[in-house]
Amino acid sequence: MSGKEDESLTPEEWALVNAILYAEEDAKQIRQIVQSYKIKRDANDKSVALFLFSLGEKLFTRENVSSATKLYSACILLDPSFVDAYLRKAETLDWREDFDKEREFLETAVERFPNRSDLLRELANLLDLQHDYSGAAAHYKKMLEINPQDGETYLKLLQFLTDHQMNSKITRLVDEIPIPPLTPRDLFRVFNFFVFAFEATQLYERALEFADKALKYKPKRIALWEKKAKIYTALKQYSKALQCYNQMILIKPQAKKYQDIRDKFVSKHKLSFG
């Protein structure tokens, strides 16, 4: 947090904050306290909630996090549609490392606002922190269902699933969520994720399909040619595997190790170099 001097509360505001904290969750009393403030006499609930939010921001900036949490709660009490107050309250709970309470709060918020990607993202990140990887993945996927054009979340979900070896979820994602608009570099990453996931689940033909798509973007990526060779070997299509090893040598003729790999493969499977 920064800007503590600029965000200091006036004595009058401190008195209001203390009165609101004492009122706890009594909406009528909170409303009356704020309306007693000389510039808020005719304020409606939304206006009162916005004012409370501004006080919460000042407290949060001063790292008075516990009090900020209570003010954001008061915002929500008076205006249950005030999504920014939900996000900030969750952030204060995160700062306090009260993760169980934060999770319960965010789950309630997501139920109330099921199409808010910002709330879904906060909950997904928290579930990741708590090692609930399936739960986190489900919320990242929900974000994509809301906005299928969200390339950043699509890539994040694929990386997340790959990091946690959730290969079956990746293979299902291919048919469940269309690939959003991406740069050629990111499309290569996506196809590469699919190659490894389909190979890991022994869906070799799909792995080869995406390996070919990836190679259109980076035709000299030796690791992919070697991956294809191994997949063809698993399928007992040795001549096609040999073609891949030969391609590796064409890409890097100076690298003797690729020639050795090819030669051992030919010898093992009793093939000819032709």
Image (spheres, helix red, strand yellow):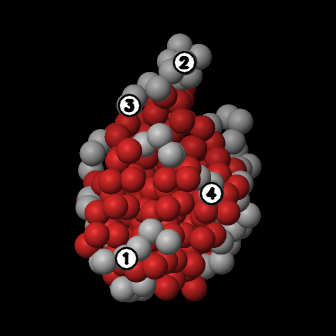
The residue nearer to you, when weighing 17 against 271, is 271
What secondary structure is marked by label 3?
loop
Q: Is residue 27 left or right of residue 135?
A: right
Q: Which mark is residue 3?
A: 2
Q: Residues within 10 Å of mark 4 (few under 14, many from 20)?
A: few
The x, y position of residue 30, in whole percent, is 51, 51
Q: Which residue is mark 1?
A: 271
Q: Earlier in the sequence, mark 2 or mark 1?
A: 2
Query: Which residue position is annotated with label 3?
Result: 64
Q: Amino acid at mark 3?
A: Asn
Vertical arrangement, residue 99 with respect to residue 178, above or below: above
Q: CA distance from mark 4 to mark 2?
A: 52 Å
Instruction: Indicate the position of residue 69 as horizontal and vertical percent values.
Output: 41, 46
Q: Is residue 45 above or below residue 232?
A: above
8 is higher (above) or lower (below) than 131: above
In the picture provided, is 195 more to the left or to the right than 31? left
Number of the front mark, 1 or 3: 1
Which residue position is annotated with label 4? 219
Residue positioned most to the top:
5
Give neighbour class at mark 1: few <14, some 14-19, many 20+ (Cα, 10 Å). Answer: few
